[in-house]
Image: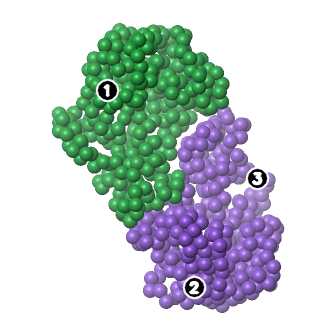
Chain colours: A green, B purple
Amino acid sequence: MPVGTLGTVKSLSPEELMEAGAQIILGNTYHLYLRPGCEVIEQFSGLHRFMNWSRPILTDSGGFQIFSLARLSKISENGATFQSHIDGSTHLLTPEKSVQIQISLGSDIIMCLDQCLPYPAEKQSAREALALTTRWARRCKDFWSCQTRKGNLLFGIVQGGMFSDLRSESVEDLVAIDFDGYAVGGLSVGEPKDLMLEMAAVTLPQLPADKPRYVMGVGTPEDLVNLVALGADMFDCVLPTRNARNGQLFTSSGTINISNACFKLDSEPIETGCSCYTCRHYSKAYLRHLYLAKELLAYRFNTIHNVHFFLDLMRRMRMSICNGNFESFKKDFFNKRA
Amino acid sequence: MPVGTLGTVKSLSPEELMEAGAQIILGNTYHLYLRPGCEVIEQFSGLHRFMNWSRPILTDSGGFQIFSLARLSKISENGATFQSHIDGSTHLLTPEKSVQIQISLGSDIIMCLDQCLPYPAEKQSAREALALTTRWARRCKDFWSCQTRKGNLLFGIVQGGMFSDLRSESVEDLVAIDFDGYAVGGLSVGEPKDLMLEMAAVTLPQLPADKPRYVMGVGTPEDLVNLVALGADMFDCVLPTRNARNGQLFTSSGTINISNACFKLDSEPIETGCSCYTCRHYSKAYLRHLYLAKELLAYRFNTIHNVHFFLDLMRRMRMSICNGNFESFKKDFFNKRA
C-alpha cells in the first residue's frame, strides 16, 4: 500500500496510482484528524471523495504516530493523551474514538488502536503493552460491532516486542476476539534486520491462513520478499515514496542514486523494460537534471517509478506463488539485486 | 506560452500541458546553457526529446536573464560577459553564440540577443541600447542565415525604453532586417502599467500585420486582453505558474488565494464550469488542505488550473476575433473580473 499520509500519496495523482496498479492506499488517522480535521472530510462523506480515490483505503489507528510524533503522549487504560505536533493542542485518543474517526474518514480497513513500544523494550513493558493492546482491541471490536455503518473491515494488531512467547500470546488473544485480518505491529522500530525477520517468522505462521496478514511499516524490496516467504500478504511503507524524493530509485539489479555524475549523459531509462510512465518517456540524464535543479517534476517522476517497482514486485510474487515457483523467483530476485 | 525555464514547466507533465491546450512553450537559454548545459541536451538532439515535448518550443536569447540574474554582467560591442548565478563561472554570450545555443537546443523560434534596460533609463542610454540591439539583431540574422540546420524561425526584439520615437526607430530598423516575427521587449520591467500599455500601443501597430507580434514577459489576464486589443499575438509569463505555487488562482470573476479560511469547507471547484482536470475532480477545500500542508500535489493541481485559465482566455479571444465580437468579449471580461 502506497502511503497517503495527508490525503495524498505525495506528488501522485489518483490516476497515476491506478496506472501503477495500486489496489489500496493507506491514510494516516493521526495526521488527517489533526489536519484538515474530520469536520472537513465529513463534508465529503469521507476521504475517497475528498481526495478523488475510488479504490479501498486502509487507515491506521493513530497509535504509532502518537508514540513517534506527538509531544508528551501519555498512556492510560482509557486511551492515549497527546499534544499535536502542529499546534500543541491536547487530545485524547481512545480505542472507540480511533475507530469512530476511521469510520468518519470512510476507511475500508480500520485498524485497532494498539500500544507500540520502541526498541529495545524490557519484557515486563512489552507484556503490559501487549495486555493493554488486547484490551483495547476488544473495545475496538465491541464499538465497531455496534456501528450501523458497515462495509468496512476491522483488523487487529499483534504486539509483544521482540519476545516470541509474548508474540504467540498476542496472536492467541486477538484470534479469540476474531478480526477480519491481522497485522504484525511493533516491527521495524529500530531492531536489527535479523531480529525483525525472526519475530515475523514466529508470528506470521500462527495467524489464520484464511485472513489477510499485514506487516506494518515494512520495508525494503528484500524485506518484502523475505516476509512474503513467511506468509505476509500486505505491507505499507513510505520507503518507495520518501526515497524517490531523495533521489533513490529501485531497480531489479539494485538501487541507484539519480544525482550520481555517471548519469549525466545517460539516455537510458531507470530500468530498461520497466513499463512505468517515467521509464517509458524519460532518461536518467533528464531525471538527474530535474533532481539537481530541485524541480517538482523530479519528485513526481521518481515516485511514479518507485511505486510502480514495489507494486510490480508484489504482482510478480503473487504470480510466482500462483504458478508454484516462488522459491525460484526469490532466488533469482536476490541474485539480481545483490 | 507557459514558461519552462529548466526544461520543465514547473510541476506539469507534457501530457498535462497538452490537455491544457498548450501549443508552444518557452525555454530559457540562459538557464539551460548553464544547467544541464548544451552537452547534455545535444545528447538528445535537442530539448524536445530531452523533456518529451513534441510541440514547438520558443527560446529566449539569454539576454534578459544576464541583465536580471547573472553577477557582474558587462556589455561590449561583441556581446555580454557575465558570471553564472550558480557557480560564478565567467561566460561570454555573443549574438552568434546565443543563436548557436538556441539551435543546439532544437528551438523552433529563436530570439535575437538584445540589450534590455531597467526602468527608469535615460533617453541616451535607451538610444545606445537600441542601436546595439539593432547591430546584434543584424549579426543574429547573418549568423542564422548561414546555418544549414533550418526549420526554425528567427524573431527580432524591439527595444527603445519608454520613448515613443525610439520605439518607432527600433521597429523600422528591425523590419528592414526582416524577421519571421517581432517581439516587444523591455516592457514589464518596473514601469507603471499605463506606461507599459502606452508603449505597447505605440509599438504594436507599427509591426508588420502579417507576422506574429509577441509581447515578452507579460502579464496578468487584464494585460493580455488589453494587449490583444492592441494587436499582440503571443505572450510568455511565469505569472500563471509562479502564482499557482503561491496559492493564487485565476478565475473569470477574479483572483483568489486558496489558503483563505473561507474555503475550509468549500466543496465547489475553483471555478464552476471550468473544464480543467483540477476543477473536474477537486474542491477548493481539498486544494486548500493540500496547500496548507505544503503537499507537492498542491503546486501541480493549482498550476494545471492557472495554465488552463490563461490558455483558455487566449482561445476565447481568438474565437471572439474570428466571430467579430472581440469588443463585447473584452467588455464582458473586464466586468466579470472587476
Please identify the quarter of the rendering in which residue A334 is found. Answer: top left
The residue depicted at 79 percent of the width and 76 percent of the height is: B121
For this view, does A31 lie left or right of residue A183? right
Q: Residues within 10 Å of mark 2 (few under 14, many from 20)?
A: many
The amino acid type, in three-letter code, at marker 2 is Cys
Residue B166 shows in the view: no
Residues at marks 2 and 3, CA–CA distance in whole angstroms: 44 Å
The amino acid type, in three-letter code, at marker 3 is Lys
Q: Which mark is residue B336?
A: 3
Q: Residues within 10 Å of mark 3 (few under 14, many from 20)?
A: few
Q: Give the answer, above or below, for where B200 lies relative to A156.
A: below
Between B75 and B15, the residue placed more toward the observer is B75
For this view, does B75 lie left or right of residue A172? right
Going from N to C along the chain, the mark reached first, 2 or 3, is 2
User: Measured from the top left, where is residue A200 in percent x and y?
Assistant: 31, 24
Q: Give the answer, above or below, for where A10 lies relative to A74.
A: below
User: Measured from the top left, where is residue A68 in percent x and y?
Assistant: 51, 27
Residues at marks 1 and 2, CA–CA distance in whole angstroms: 69 Å
Q: Residues within 10 Å of mark 1 (few under 14, many from 20)?
A: few
Residue A188 shows in the view: yes
Q: Which residue lies under the disc numbered 1?
A: A195
Q: Which residue lies under the disc numbered 2?
A: B140
Name the chain under label 3: B
For this view, does B226 lie left or right of residue A209? right
Same-chain check, marks 1 and 2: no
The residue depicted at 77 percent of the width and 71 percent of the height is: B119
Please identify the quarter of the rendering in which residue B297 is found. Answer: top right
